[in-house]
Structures are given as C-alpha cells and as structure tokens.
C-alpha cells in the first residue's frame, strides 16, 4: 500500500498548472472516456468531460495519430447538431499480456486497448511437481507462443502481468504454500526466460500480482456487477484466494498481502493447513478438500463433482454443502468486518452454485449483524465467466496505457 | 462510504482555478500545517507547503483575524534568516464537543483547535435500564454542563459528534444490541434535548458515529502510533467494537457498518449473542463475558478483574487468557484479510495487557499466513490512555474547521 503524505492532500493549489501535464492528463481523460463508452463521438466526449468541442477534437487527433483511437466509419446523430463520426479504442497496437500461473494450469491471454480478450492459451500443467524456475519457464514458453499469435493480429503487448496464487510484493513471491514457493523472484525469472524466447521485445516489463487481486479487477471491469464498486471476491482453486475492492480500488494492505480469506480460521482445531495453521477455510472449501470429502480422486476435477452434486449423489451434495457452510462462516466474519455491497464467488464455485449458495446464504443471514444479508438481497453472486485472473492481469497493463497514453510509442 | 464517480478522477484539469476557492484551500493548508506542527513560524510553514513567504503571511493574517491562529510571543530562529514569531492554533474560540454514550457511562469532552482535551465529564450511568430517548436526554444534560464550563474558558463548540456502540448511518442508530436500541434517530433526539437545555446555541449541528470509529481516529491523531497509518482498532467494553483505518482514513463500508469484529464468529456453536448469532467474539472477550468467566459479579468492573489476574488468581488468569486466545483467533482472520501494520487494543484491554497479549500473540504467530506477526514484531499494542471515543468524536468536529476555516465566524 502506498503511503500518502501525513498531511493528506496538503499541497498548495496554484492557479496555473503546467501546460504539457494538463494535455497529458486530458489525453488520458479522453481516451478513458472513449474506452468506457465503447463507441462514442467527439461531441459526446466533450459533453461528458466538460471540455470544449475544439479541445476534444485536438486531443482526439493526437490519439488517432498514435493509433490509440480509430474512427469506425459509422456516424451517429444521437446528440443535437450534425452527425459525428464514431470513435472507439483501437483493436490493434498496444496490448496487455496476462499470465496466470496456478497449481494445475497456466493461462495466458492478450487483451487489446478496448479490453477484449483476443488471444488465449490455457495449458493444464501440474506445477507442484516442478521447481519455481521451471514453472516460470513453462509459463514463458506458453507466453511466447501467445505473443507470436498476437503479433499476427498486429497486437503488441507493452507489458506483462503475472498472476500468482500467493503473497506477492515488489516482484517477489513471498510465499505460495500450494505451489511450495518461498521467496521466489518471479518477475526476474520470468523476464529472463521470456527474453530468451521472444527476442523481438526483450525490454517487455514484467510485474507480478496476487491472482485473486487481478481476478477481482477483472470482475470489476468486465463482470456483471453493475453499480457495485465495493465487494469481496473469492477464487476457489486448490487454495482459496480472496481480494477486497473498496470504491473500485483494491485494498492491498500494508505489505500487499491483504485478502487472504483462505487462511481465515473456521475451526480452531481443524486440519493442518499448508500455511502451518489449523482449520483454515481452504481445508474445507478448497478444491482438494472438496474432492476428498466427496470421495473423489484428486485428479477428478470440479466438473465431475458438480455433475454428481447436481444428480443428488449423497456424498457429493454433503461435501458441497459443508464447504458452503464453512464459506458462509468465514464470509460472515469478513462481511461484519468490511460491510461490502456484494460477495463474488469465482474459480470453481460458480459451477457448484446451486448447492453451494443456499448453505452460504444461511450462514450469512444468521450471522451478519446488519441484517442486510438475506438470500433475497442477492448480495452473493457467482463470478462472470468472462472475468478471470489472466484477463484481469492483462487489463492492468492496459490501464497503465489509458492512464498515460503517450508512454506508448507506435 | 461515499461513492466516487465511476470514471475515477475523470475531470479535466483547467489551467486556471477559481481564485476564491484557491484561497480557501490554502487557508486550510496553512492552518493544518500549524496544527500539526504544534508551534512553528511563517517561514517554516512556507518551506513546508511550497508557497511563497508573502503568500503565507497574508494567509496567516486572515487566520489571526479570525481567531484561529495566535502568536505565542516567543520567537524562533531554527530556520535561516531573521527570527520568526511563533504561531500556534488558538486555544480559545471554535471547539468540538464529543459525547460518548456507552452501556455503563456517558463521557463528554470539549477539544480545542489544537486538539487538546479541555473539559471532560464522565458519568457512570446504566444505560440499559432506560429507553433511548431518556439516555439521550441524560447525555444532553451532561453535555449542557460541559458547554457551560467550556464557555467560561472562551471555548465555543461549533458542532457535536455522538459516539455510539452500534451500527450508525445517516443520523440513525440502525441497531445497538447492547443498548437494546433499534432504529433510534439519535441525532434528532439529542439535538432536541440539548436545545432545551442550552439555548445559547440552538443551532449546534449534531451528527452520530460508531464509537469504535472515533476511538480509532483518536488513536490515529493523539495516540502513540508514530508512522503507523493502517491499523485495526478494537475497543473492549460490554461489547467489542472495531474499526479499520487504511492510510489514515476510516474504512466505513458500503453502509457505514464496517469494523464489527465483535460479531466475528470464533466458535460456530458458541453461546447465543445479543445480535442473534452464535459464538461471536464478544461472547468471550467482552467485559460481561470476562467477568462471568472469572467468577465476578457483572458490576465488579475491570479494575477488580485486572487486580486478581495480576495477583495470579487462577480463575481470573484463565478468563483473561481464554479471552486472549479468542481475540487472537478472530484477529488472525482479520489480519489475514486486511494486512494492517498494527492492531490496537483499547477500552478495557490495556489494563489486562500483561495476561492478554501473550495469548493473543500466540494465535497471531501461529495463524497469520505472512509470518509477520511474531510477538517480537510488536504489532499488537495497547491503546493510548489519552485517546478515547469522546475525544475522537470532538476532534472530528475540529477537523471540519481545519478543512474549511472560513465556515467558522467568530
């Protein structure tokens, strides 16, 4: 978490701001406005942001020249005055590369400036049987293939964001218990591996984030949350990841380690967890725990579990309902602490929702002190299928382009 | 929680800002800078805020005229150049009135512009035996006495902030289980009662807040946290209140109900709580639960418990240690979720710290996944004796004066 100065906003306002920085700010403003609208006109942008039509036209020209905006050829006359040419974010040029490395797979995608998931490769890989360096090299190999495909579509990632199931801070994976990683310098290892495979852009900057964090951002940007801007996001995998979004921003914590709901204790004397504690939520609601409780092999997969639960198979139903009860217990504590507008369940959970959500809802209704968490309130939601950690990671790179468009030179 | 616009900072920067609003902003900046420094000079303020010496002198003149700053008579030559007259925030004039209404007492204080607690009256009152209107009238009676004393010191509160142990939102106490309140319009009832007793200022605006929230702000502003700006704050009373501070700001939640750590479940089948759930933290670590577990009468008080625990009396020691273990369990979950820099224990807890903190620390060391919460790290702290909810509430009023000094007319 970045520290704000102690005086909190204590800087003088000068009547004059530097002209170049004003233009940079306004270029970003116009580009973001078009990005959010999807398709719009110069006149609509001007009305939305409160600049003159002439100022917006000049800013749009520069963004067109840089290949960040394109004119669609259509015209649109929704506003008063003569019809305007429709503008949209470019679907070629600068892009983001997202790389999710999880326990059982690697998923890589390229997202364009409009936010669309344009190239995607997901490879099942057992990442627990290899060391960190080898896993990162495998991921780099998948990424190099994706970069080659993207180049064929004239999409050129300007940065890479890794999404990892662990405590990540400043380029280092502090620990990822389910991968067996401790103090792994993921950014550097991945960059070196990719540099050897993708010589065209050896300078591609690499940064890491927690996978639950970027999955939550994907839900915020691409999911079906509507007006909801404050929520708790869980991703059920082998572990249970969590992220907290407050007013559209991630709450990262003092060391970047916030959101670890998978290690919230739900039974103080419960089974030993890989983190060293006992009775952590993921010992009940993680994928391995669920499959075991349902009497399935570790490799069976959540689809098999869901099929059995939907068919009413007793052990499968009991396993999912017990996981739901424990999830509800942990979430009650989290909701009492954070008072979010919604809780989103992602990863393996959406597929299990019909049996899972009644059990979660029952605990929330019973235990949340505000009384706002009745099942009828609809605050518990499955994650969108279009929002995942890899797309969120790639979109973080795109946000950097949107925030300062001139950093990208075509 | 105030919603930020969806476009997050999407407003154009114009090279020219309105001159009157620039001056207002800069008056606040200068006043806050002096407030934080305690004592300082015009030259130091100018160096600190980045305005010219002349601009600062003009702003200081206006603040002196308004009675918000005073010259102490001393001179100070710490900076280069000729010695400057020492400035400080006025210790007369605009002030804040804080009124904490808790289960067993009412505490009222007046805080001056410098933040000092100048007039304080605390009355033990059993607020569970009376209705909400009567309790608020009692509190108004205490407040009227405090206002009269304050006037003798030429201190004139410009607003009242109530601190209440419950879910508070927009002037209404949604619920306060330990007071037995449901949907009580506390602001209006208190304002009416005070208006009848203190006719001099019938227009004194009244607002309510959760007591744990303002206690946390008091710790932030007046406690011994040093550079810590992100922490979790607990107040042990009959209930257990909680508040979350992130980068120096309260995390209030979507409905203003965040921080309810007292209702985090620590044993799903534990005793029934007043909130309707089972096994909430306050059923183990609240004052009533602690006294009961130690074999003491409900009226015995925490001082008696602390005396017995310090003397090694077996039941008292066991009660405090068990409360510590449950606190540690709940806090482990909260720390895994929020990754704060510190946890502050206030209310009855500082007096019990010698027996309490080893038990809390043991759970944190065992269960926090980051491994950062070893006892040696010193992240668990007792609240400062100078920081309580009434002072925090009064200081919130002062912050409003600091944010826009011209709203106060002498």
Image (cartoon, coloured by chain):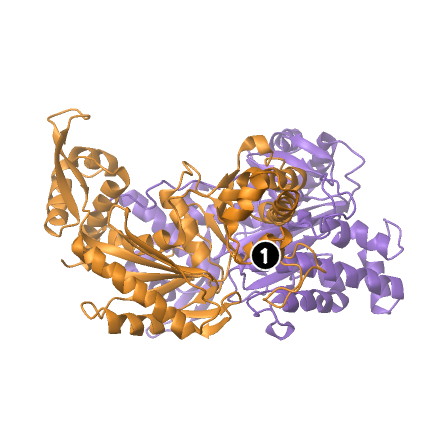
Chain colours: A purple, B orange
Mark 1 Cα shell of 10 Å, populated few (<14), some (14-19), many (≥20)? many
Closest to the observer, B6 or B46: B46
Closest to the observer, A129 or A331: A331
In the drawing, does residue A410 fall left or right of residue B10? Answer: right
Q: Position of residue A246 (x, y in %)?
A: 50, 55
Decide: is A119 above or below B86.
below
Decide: is A353 above or below A211.
below
* Disc 1 secondary structure class: helix
Residue B158 visible in rendering: no
In the drawing, does residue A92 fall left or right of residue B385? Answer: right
**What residue lies at 42% left-to-right and 56% top-to-bottom?**
B8
**What residue lies at 14% left-to-right and 36% top-to-bottom?**
B53
Q: Position of residue B210 (x, y in %)?
A: 44, 60
Label 1 chain ID: B
Instruction: Determine which quarter of the picture holds residue B76.
Output: top left
Residue B26 visible in rendering: yes
């Amino acid at each position: 978490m970045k520290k704000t100065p102690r005086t909190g906003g204590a800087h003088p306002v000068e009547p004059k701001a530097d002209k170049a920085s004003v233009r940079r700010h306004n270029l970003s403003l116009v580009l973001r406005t078009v990005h959010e609208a999807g398709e719009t006109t110069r006149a609509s942008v001007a009305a939305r942001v409160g600049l003159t039509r002439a100022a917006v036209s000049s800013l749009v020209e520069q963004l067109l020249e840089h290949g960040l905006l394109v004119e669609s050829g259509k015209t649109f006359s929704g506003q008063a005055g003569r019809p305007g040419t429709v503008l949209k974010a470019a679907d070629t040029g600068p892009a983001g590369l997202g790389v999710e490395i999880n326990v059982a797979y690697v998923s890589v995608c390229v997202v364009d400036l409009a936010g669309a998931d344009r190239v995607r490769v997901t490879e099942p890989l057992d990442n627990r049987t290899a060391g960190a360096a080898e896993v990162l090299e495998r991921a780099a190999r998948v990424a190099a293939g994706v970069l080659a495909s993207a180049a064929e579509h004239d999409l050129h990632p300007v940065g890479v964001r890794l999404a990892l199931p662990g405590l990540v801070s400043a380029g280092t994976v502090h620990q990822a218990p389910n991968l067996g990683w401790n103090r792994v310098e993921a950014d550097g290892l991945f960059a070196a591996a990719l540099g050897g495979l993708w010589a065209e852009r050896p300078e591609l900057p690499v940064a890491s984030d927690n996978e639950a964090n970027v999955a939550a951002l994907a839900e915020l940007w691409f999911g079906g949350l509507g007006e909801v801007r404050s929520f708790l996001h869980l991703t059920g995998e082998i572990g249970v990841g969590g992220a907290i979004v407050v007013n559209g921003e991630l709450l990262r914590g003092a060391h970047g380690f916030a959101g670890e709901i998978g290690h919230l204790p739900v039974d103080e004397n419960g089974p030993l967890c890989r983190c060293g504690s006992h009775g952590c939520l993921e010992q009940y609601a993680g994928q391995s725990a669920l499959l075991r409780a349902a009497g399935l092999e570790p490799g069976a997969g959540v689809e098999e579990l869901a099929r059995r639960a939907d068919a009413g198979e007793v052990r499968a139903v009991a396993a999912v309902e017990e996981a739901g009860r424990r999830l509800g217990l942990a979430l009650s504590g989290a909701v009492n602490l954070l008072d979010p507008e919604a809780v989103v369940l992602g990863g393996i959970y959406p597929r299990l929702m019909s049996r899972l959500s009644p059990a979660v809802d029952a605990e929330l209704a019973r235990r949340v002190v505000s009384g706002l968490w009745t099942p009828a309130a609809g605050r518990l939601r499955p994650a969108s299928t279009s929002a995942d950690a890899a797309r969120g990671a790639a979109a973080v790179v795109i946000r950097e382009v949107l925030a300062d468009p001139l950093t990208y030179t075509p």
